[in-house]
Image (cartoon, rainbow, N blue to C red):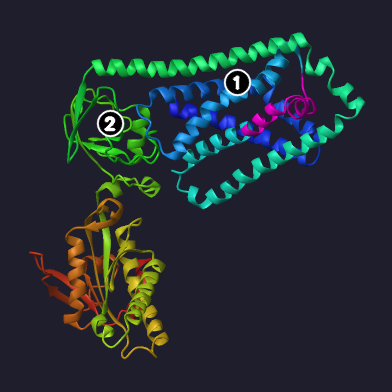
Amino acid sequence: MPSLRQIRLATGLVLFVYVALHFANHALGNISVEAMDEGLLLQKAIWQSPPGAAILYASLFTHMSLGFWALYARRHFRWTRLEATQLVLGLTIPFLLADHFVGTRVALSQFGLEKSYEQEFLKFWVNAPVFGMLQAILLLIVWIHGCLGVHFWLRLKPFYPSVKELLLAIAVLLPALALLGYYQGGERTLLAVQDPAWRARNMSPEHVGTPAQNAVLLDDRTRILVFLGAALALTFLARGVRHLRERHSGSIRLTYPDRTIRAPRGFSVLEASLINNIPHAHVCGGRGRCSTCRIRVLSDMSALPTPSASEQAVLERVHASPGVRLACQLRPTSDIAFVPMLSPHATTVDAYGSGAAYSGVERYVVIMFVDMRGSSRLAEGRLPFDTVFVINQFLNAVSGAVLSAGGEPNQILGDGLLALFGMGARPEAGCRQAIVACAAIAARVETLNSALAYALLEPIRFGIGIHAGITIAGNIGYERHAQFTVIGDAVNVAARLEEMTKAFGCEVVMSEEVYERAGFGPDDLPAHDVDPRGREARMKARSVARAADLAALLDAQTPAAS
């Protein structure tokens, strides 16, 4: 069964398509009013057909009702500017739309008054210019409300950043053309109304209605406005009644890592946070879509309401472990202790990367440490700018080599780099990627040395350490400075292997784990029994005097690997 959010999205998209086609038809006014009437035939074929009319009216009534429900359900008014704009504009639309709805749809269904653009322009530009201005304002309000809804829907999609500029251009161009067409059609009507034949054709009662019919339509409009006003008043009244009921039903205690608060029973965890001015991530505005508000419950889980279908779907999407809930959906009925899992400053980037790997998971990774040799001597006798320039050129060369081999530069460590391989591949493939990267680093550094020969007293040298194993991967850091990385014994070993390149006088030292998974033979590279600092057991490692030699060695291993 679809959730309220899914119903609101579906009905909103139907209305947005209707408005977009309506705008496109208005834009034909830049050609002629006759072109607008011809385009109107297509609109009628779609929206006045029995299926089209049923879908349109059901979507309009449902979406409007859900707007009132959203106003009732919200426990606080701490919206972002965009959220507040969307809600306020959405609530004004029914009131502004009432006159146009009665003058077209109700007039057609009650009295068979099928109006063309000529009669509408006559009303809005000749008989009642104030309503014409309100109609133009309505066009903008409806469009902005719809565009905000589409933005809130798409901003969590990974492809959205690549298309949002195109969508923005369309969102600006289409209403501009529609309003210009509306203006052009009105100006043509002001000229045409001087023609007696035009007036006789377009001002007859069969088109504009008799005085009695218009009086009935005016009463209908008044009843609709009264109904909408009553619905809005009842919504606020229901909020007040609920507030009184919640005050008498008692409160519960919510324990954060650094504080404890009380909130009325029935509040969601997110609502309790925001009402008490406690920062809490909620990129999607508390709609249960982004998962950035998720918390890890520390108290008894059995006392909590079970997740709804929509909450469960989001939790499964991010591979949430037991004990994780969405703060915007969880409405505890008893005391609860929890820890927010993301920084209060989480963004849509965190929503894109909201899988288990970002909240902490064990993962087999190939780790490479690359260090620039002699960077302290490089700084002697040089301007700071020159030193930074050379180091940046080195890091660019190394990062480019890592990326070309299929790896991911992860952290810049002074004049060195931590890179990860095999994040989306089998361990064997990740190990070979790291070996390919070593040869690519050697080639790129050699090119860099040639390019900077005029400025270097001696060529840039480097050391590389490679190890692979199980690590803990996740976003690690403080609030806005959190970054995806890996920690664990395998990372420590890779760093120590890089340090050993100095003792061995070589450019690369790799663990036996990497050596074997990369597909090398038993005696392809010199073996060493090493004791990495910070590790209890000794281990076997392989050294490579020149990283560039790995290219030929890989070529020799390719037939065997294949």
Label 2 CA crowd tier, 10 Å (few <14, some 14–19, many 20+): many
Residue 245: image quadrant is top left
Residue 406 belongs to the span the image colors magenta: no
For numbered disc 1, what is the local secondary structure? helix
Task: Report the front residue among 135 and 251.
Answer: 135
Pick the quarter of the image with the C terminus: bottom left
Residue 544 x, y percent position in the rendering: 25, 79
Tell me which segment is drawn in magenta: 114-137
Would residue 169 be found to the left or right of residue 365 on screen? right
- Between the residue at mark 1 and the residue at mark 2, the CA separation in whole angstroms equals 37 Å
Disc 1 marks which amino acid? Tyr
Disc 2 marks which amino acid? Ala
Task: Report the front residue among 307 and 344.
Answer: 344
Return the residue found at the far left.
536
* Residue 545 in the image: above or below residue 492: below
For numbered disc 2, what is the local secondary structure? helix
Residue at (60% x, 23% y) in the render: 55
Residue at (30% x, 45% y) in the render: 356
